[in-house]
Amino acid sequence: MICAAILCCTAGFSQTISNDKIPAAIKSSFATKFPSATNLKWVKEPNGNYEAKFMEEKISRRAEFDKQGTWVESEKVISTTEVPKTVSDAVAKHNPSCKISEAEEIIKADKSTVYEVGCKTEAGKKDYRITPDGKVEAKIEKK
């Protein structure tokens, strides 16, 4: 479900790129970091970075690399039961009627972690990016 949402959200802003058009440095970096990846698809982000969408150990993942091939961050879909309590408590504090319906764990190059959780509200979908200690980094409204 989250993959479909991600695809819908990024489709209008990202450009699908065939594997043969990906710079060698990015391919090499990806292969080193994710050697067991399957079902690989690439998109070029509006910021010029490249994002790989793939499966690894039956988990939907994404990984972003800059133009030089440096890994920026990676995301994996997690179940809503895997969301840390501090994160779900932060969502409840900001929007008590919001029930988490999807979640991703994001690991950044600086080794920090952030969770992106989505929930449905009467006004539409709302996503939050929250640190493990419960700090809301971003709120994203979607209709």
Image (cartoon, grey):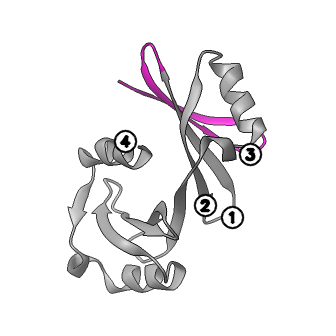
Magenta span of residues:
121-143
**Magenta highlight on residue 124:** yes
Q: Amino acid at mark 1?
A: Lys
Expressed as whole percent of the image width and height from the top left, the position of residue 67 reads 38, 72
Assign the C terminus to one quadrant of the image: top left
Disc 3 and disc 4 in contact, CB within 8 angstroms? no
Do we see residue 37 in this rendering? yes
Badge 1 density bin: few <14, some 14–19, many ≥20, Cα 10 Å: few
Residue placed most toward the observer, 45 or 31: 31
The earlier-in-sequence mark between 3 and 4 is 4
Disc 2 and disc 3 in contact, CB within 8 angstroms? no
Which residue, given by chain and number where applicable, does mark 2 sit on? 108
Residue drawn where x is 25% and y is 77% of the image? 19
Q: Which mark is residue 132?
A: 3
Disc 1 and disc 2 in contact, CB within 8 angstroms? yes
Which residue, given by chain and number where applicable, does mark 1 sit on? 111
**Magenta highlight on residue 100:** no
Which residue, given by chain and number where applicable, does mark 4 sit on? 5
Residue placed most toward the observer, 121 or 106: 121
The earlier-in-sequence mark between 1 and 3 is 1
Assign the N terminus to one quadrant of the image: top left
